[in-house]
Image (cartoon, grey):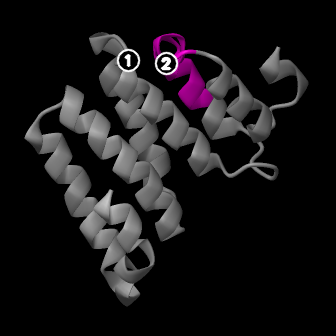
Amino acid sequence: KYRESCQASVVLHAILAAFPPSLVSTAALDLCDLVRTADDTSYPRFHLYVSLVAAMCAHPPPKAEQMPILNSIWKQLAEMHNVEHYVAVAAQLARFLAIEFSYAEVTKLLKDVARRVTPNKAFAQVQPQLHS
């Protein structure tokens, strides 16, 4: 019904908040698509990714779906231009990677974070998020 009626990010946020992490995590691959296509004029899309990945940390999705989910989120993360939004999602994603993947994926993400926050001393803006 969500796809047919509104596609508003604020509604998707309410959906993510209303259901337990186990249910959100089970539908994570489909939710990635909904987040990607959500109209984010009412609620920033990056908050949706943070909520989705937090649910995945609390209750990991099936192993077979983890890499496709990671690829979907990574693709959207790569397109984020606001460094504060990027770091908010990356911080949550680092938790998930540390729980479910190897040091190789964690290292790749951390190198990308360092690459993103170094220009123009952007790290000063996101320092509190980097400490979390």
For this orientation, the residue located farthest to the right is: 5
| Disc assigned to residue 21 | 2
17 or 34, nearer to the observer: 17
Q: Which residue is mark 1?
A: 59
Disc 1 residue type (three-letter) = His
Q: Which range is magenta? A: 20-33
Quarter that holds the C terminus: bottom left
In the displayed structure, 16 sits above or below 39; it is above
- CB atoms of marks 1 and 2 within 8 Å: yes
- Please tell me which residue is depicted at 90% across the width and 23% down the height of the picture: 5
Whole-percent x and y of residue 53?
44, 34
- Give the mark, 1 or 2, whose residue is nearer the N terminus: 2
Majority secondary structure of the magenta segment? helix
Q: Secondary structure at mark 2?
A: helix
Disc 2 residue type (three-letter) = Pro
In the displayed structure, 1 sits above or below 53; it is above
Whole-percent x and y of residue 24?
53, 18
- Please tell me which residue is depicted at 62% across the width and 16% down the height of the picture: 19
